Amino acid sequence: MSTLGDDLVLLSVWQGGGRLTAPNVIGVGLMGAELVRLAASGRVQITDGRITVLDAAPTGDAEADAALASLAAQRRPPRARTWCSRPRRGICDAYLARLAAAGVLQRQDQTRLGFIRVTRWQVTDTARVTDARARLDAIAQGTGQVDLGQAAFGGLAHAVGLAGRLYPGRDGRDRRKRLELVAGRTGRRRTPTMRSRTRCTRRATPRSRRPSTRRRTRPCPRRTPRTPRGPAAMAAPRTAATDRFP
């Protein structure tokens, strides 16, 4: 549970070839991960979709403390869905920097075309990636009940799009459906905390990126013949009607 956000960023960088493919989506997932961690540790409570801070004391984790301070600064208990959908500035960079400080990632600054700066992240601790992937595989391949940590990991991985990239094609269809079931999108009964977490993860994918189920048809334009006017009318060819009635 303590490495939930780090695992999401690490798997995203590893699968994305050294970069975060969708940092905005990952940012929303990280907000959801922090909310789950705070709720599991008893620092916050989610009631009727709103987050109430129970203990604002520092947790010792920089990112969790930033999330807790953001919640405590609200005038009224925010809605979990709204709070998760607004990632704080620099949240992805903070997690990348923390993984780099731990020796898991290494930053590589490159220049393309002589002036375009590109930042890549190389995974230096492959054992950490293997462990995170193995835990996600265990959730995706399982058939029984999952605990809170597994539900959060599998649900957030599904929400940020890791399921489709890690388990593509027909071979991964059963694993994707399993993660979708863990995410709680099939109408399974959930606790209030799980329902609030699912609302957060659903906001991770913007509506513009969601596949549309509505069939779009483009009407065929009807072209009507234009009646010649002015000098063009005098030069128009004579029809059968004009030949019959001069």
Image (spheres, helix red, strand yellow):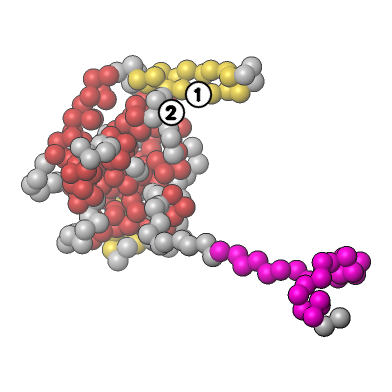
Image vertical order of residue 83 relative to residue 12, above or below: below
Residue 242 in percent (x, y) is at 81, 77
Q: Spot the residue most to the front.
A: 244
Which disc number belongs to residue 19? Answer: 2
Q: Is residue 223 visible?
A: yes
Whole-percent x and y of residue 166?
A: 28, 34
Please state which amino acid type lies under the numbered disc 2: Arg
Q: Quadrant of residue 111?
A: top right
- Disc 1 marks a residue whose amino acid type is Thr
- Residue at figure coordinates x 33%, y 16% from the top left: 124
Q: Residue at x 37, y 59 (%)?
A: 213
Q: Is residue 233 magenta?
A: yes
Whether tag 2 and tag 1 are in contact, CB under 8 A, the answer is yes
Q: Estimate the x, y position of residue 102 in percent, counting from the top left.
A: 34, 21
* Relative image position of residue 139 (x, y in whole percent): 16, 40
Residue nearer the viewer, 237 or 140: 237
Q: Secondary structure at mark 2?
A: loop
Looking at the picture, tell me which residue is in the foreground, 56 or 99.
99
Residue in the image at 39% along x and 53% along y: 211
**Magenta residue span:** 220-244
Left or right for 141, reference 26? left
Residue plotted at (46% across, 32% down): 93
Residue 119 tag number:
1
Q: Nearer the viewer, residue 71 or 20?
A: 20
Q: Quadrant of residue 186?
A: bottom left
32 in magenta = no
Question: Relative to 57, is 117 on the left or the right?
Answer: right
Determine whether the residue tagged by mark 1 lies in a helix, strand or loop.
strand
